Amino acid sequence: MSRRVFLRQVIASGTSCILSSALPATGGSTVWAAESTAAPARWRPDEPPNRPIGTAKGIFPGRVVWIHDPAAARWDGDTKAGGWYEDRFTDPAAADRMLSQTLRALTGANSDSQAWKSLFQQFNQSRARGSAGYQPGEKVAVKLNLNCCKRRVDPTQGFYNTPQLTVALLRQLVRQAGVRPSDLVFYDASRFVPDSIFIPCHAELPDVRFEDRDGGEGRFKVQPDRGAALYFGDPATPSHGKTYLPECLTGATYLINAAVLKGHSLAGVTLCAKNHFGSVWRDDTDPKDPHLGWNPSHLHGSITTTSRPMGTYNSLVDIMGHRHFGGKTVLYLIDGLYASPHQSVLPEKWQSAPFSGHWTASILASQDPVAIESVAVDFCGAEETQIKMTGAVDNYLHEAAMPHKAPSGTRYAPAGDHRLLESLGVHEHWNDPTKRQYSRDLGTGDGIELVKG
């Protein structure tokens, strides 16, 4: 990035930056500090629409499926009368139906079982593991986003995975994919698995394992694996090479990234990539750390969109490309039955079409980790209630699409073995918020295909 382009971006974002050096360092080690001189500008893409970068992934490369059913979410918003997580407000049958439709649309299969078979087979083939699908004894981890779960029973806590879609996913994995219940683990290392999810899942399939920060009450305590470290493209990042992953993940053969549709006060959005901020542990936190080491605060500086412009290092790319994260992910899933403006609040109804004052009532799914985030960012960018969409929100997607030629010049090698990441997926922006078309939809490029249902 030239000095002139960088300064234009700074001026456009409404901030002034104090730089430790004039330009981004090729090693990604520049420290960016910012002093706000004005309210940060609303995010807008800095590249034209339908200009894909990176290499599309999946059975149908670059395919993202979006299923929308307004009947799935019926909560009236009255917390005193009940919560969005209850079956009377979020339809379990609709969640089952929507997930089935999602899986078939993503794979082109005629049945749910065939869809899962295709997903596992394509995953193994793309990693030179042969053409077999899931085999009994292979562990399957599911990463939930339970960031708002500060205790197991609390009707006032904010927004996390809907129990209805979580139960639907569990049933799919056991009944349609044929995964043995004892081979399944659902987890979030930094929070608690709430009763609203654990009780119905455990009642139906008691052999499925649930892991959270503390364990107890039928849950198991997440344990760190000191043999599996995360190395950052910017070596100056705290706990470089001393940030570890959970054993339930490193011991798994496959991973399903089950995120939620949520904004974030630092990153603009928290989707599949940032979901794994609940999967990192370090032993150098304060002894009184309430997260017991499962604390990603050392990564916050690299993801703050209002202080880091386009073309800067982002730790989300290291996470997306690590062999135990993106390297094991069979399916990227965003639970969008509800959506919230940021990590600390309840869901809000969206005003943009086709939601038009209703809940988002949606599911997004893909095999391409960059494509699904690109689509979700476009949706959030078009929605006025997503108030944290400020600054360089899609910087990490540019870096992830081209990590071997990263705009920042960073050398991303998260395994610590000096092997640089190749493209993690394809990034582009749609043509407009009404048509919502990408280059494969238009037949103009090898980027994203958005399948709507």
Image: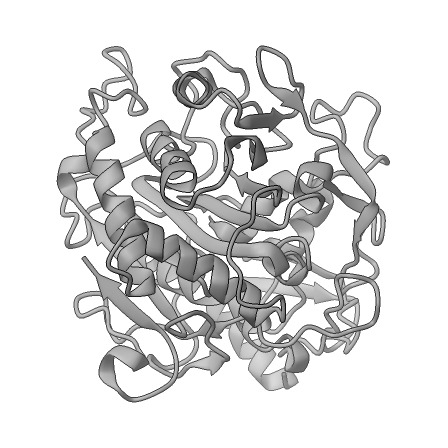
**Residue 413, percent across and down?**
76, 68
**Residue 232, percent across and down?**
76, 60
Q: Is residue 101 left or right of residue 256?
A: left
Which is more toward the observer, 134 or 325? 134
Residue found 47% across the figure and 37% down from its top: 343
**Residue 169, percent across and down?**
38, 39
Which is more toward the observer, 342 or 182? 182
Q: Is residue 138 left or right of residue 133?
A: right
Q: Where, by quadrant of the figure, is residue 336 drawn?
A: top left
Residue found 35% across the figure and 56% down from its top: 115
- Is residue 53 something one can see in this rendering? yes
**Number of numbered callouts drawn:** 0
Residue found 50% across the figure and 37% down from its top: 145
Which is more toward the observer, 41 or 130? 130
Q: Looking at the figure, which quarter contains the N terminus?
A: bottom right
363 vs 175: above or below? below
7 vs 145: above or below? below
362 vs 131: above or below? above
Which is more toward the observer, 354 or 408? 354
- Is residue 395 something one can see in this rendering? no
